[in-house]
Amino acid sequence: MNKVIRILVQVAIIHIFFFAAIGVKAFLPIPLPTTIVGLLLLFFALLVKLVKIEWVEEGGRWLMAELLLFFIPSAVGIVNYNELAGVQGFFIVLIIAISTIIVLGVTALLIEKWEVNQS
Amino acid sequence: MTIIFITLLTFGLYRFSRMLARRFPILLFHPLIFTPALIIIVIQLLPISVNTYTAGSVVLTHMLAPATIAFAIPMYKHIAFLRQYFVQIICGVLVGSIVAILSSFGLALLFNVDEHLLISLLPRSITTPLAIEVSTEIGGVPALTIVFVIITGILGSLVGPLVFNLLNIQSAMAKGLALGMAAHAVGTNRALEYGEEAVTFSTLAMIFAGVITIILGLTVLPLIIFLL
């Protein structure tokens, strides 16, 4: 039970940075999404020791570990798009597969060659 | 009341699906395939409309925002890595992001996919909350983008190990960066197999891929789409 409360409190602390980001965006015209502004705010708060890592680490780990859960409602929304059921849907999965293989290959090869050259 | 019920229902089915996936590690039981499929069946039986379900699941969807912000924690913990390999990370992710966008664009043209599907495809390799923002910005359909992001994550985490074997990739940094770049958080999950170092690079790649794609989304992409 103690652990659950700790995680809840820490998730609430992380939420403060979400609201802070909304506030910052209201005053400054930053062309970045709220979540990235929040991420940067939390990062700098940790850097300048305004927030201790122990205050957010456990809650943060829980949020990241359960990330797949937060995607599920959006995945259910797919039933609203019948157009994906036909040929177009098949092509799209094919496009995503080919493109993802290219991205994986190019990025991995680039970094691998770079490391080999350096050593 | 509906919110509580739908949240608990989703959470329960998700746990069940994860338990099955751990026991039988096959694609069908992937939490992002099996859970939504179960939910679609359950809400048909109850019956709850898809829109009621979506409205009732706001708490879960909302958690994507703090979950993204929480990635500041591993970034901070691995600041030494970030400083040491900053150039490699930025170059890898910049090249990866451009390749991701251009290859999706080119293939979509090749297969003659509808324009709104094509535009919704472009930000598919980054994490959901950010992909939604880019999709909205460039005139895509966010709901479609979310689905493409999920498909990308699943496919990327499946084919990643095959691609690394085929190209004989040895370095943990290369594997981690490629997985985080190509398949965002689901890829980062896969990077767990290659150790803590790979997870760190994967996390950093995922964050920077999101930021770089947003910058491209605000500058270069509207131009490309305009030329369409």
Image: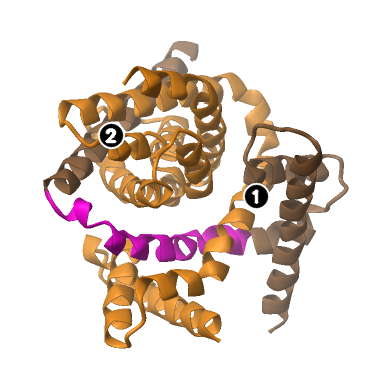
Counting from the top left corner in percent of width and height, residue A6 is at 73, 72
Q: Measuring 64% from the left and 35% from the top, which residue is drawn there?
A: A32
Q: Could you classify mark 1 by the number of other residues whose Cα lies within 10 Å: few (under 14), some (14-19), or many (20 or more)?
A: many
Please identify the dominant SS of the magenta region.
helix
- The Cα–Cα distance between marks 1 and 2, rounded to whole angstroms, is 32 Å
SS state under label 2: helix
Residue beneath disc 2 = B115
* Marker disc for residue A72: none
Q: Measuring 37% from the left and 78% from the top, which residue is drawn there?
A: B16
Magenta stretch: residue A71 in it?
yes
Query: Is B154 situated above or below B100?
Result: below
Asked whether B68 or B165 is in front, the reply is B68
Identify the chain of the residue marked 2, using the numbered disc in the image. B
Counting from the top left corner in percent of width and height, residue B82 is at 64, 31
Name the residue type under label 1: Ile
Asked if one can make out residue B169 in the rendered structure from this viewpoint, the answer is no
Please give the range of residues in magenta. Answer: A61-86
Q: Mark 1 or mark 2: which comes first in sequence?
A: 1
Query: Is A118 situated above or below A82?
Result: above
Residue beneath disc 1 = B69
Q: Measuring 64% from the left and 24% from the top, which residue is drawn there?
A: B84
Q: Nearer the viewer, mark 1 or mark 2?
A: 2
Q: Measuring 72% from the left and 77% from the top, which residue is drawn there?
A: A5
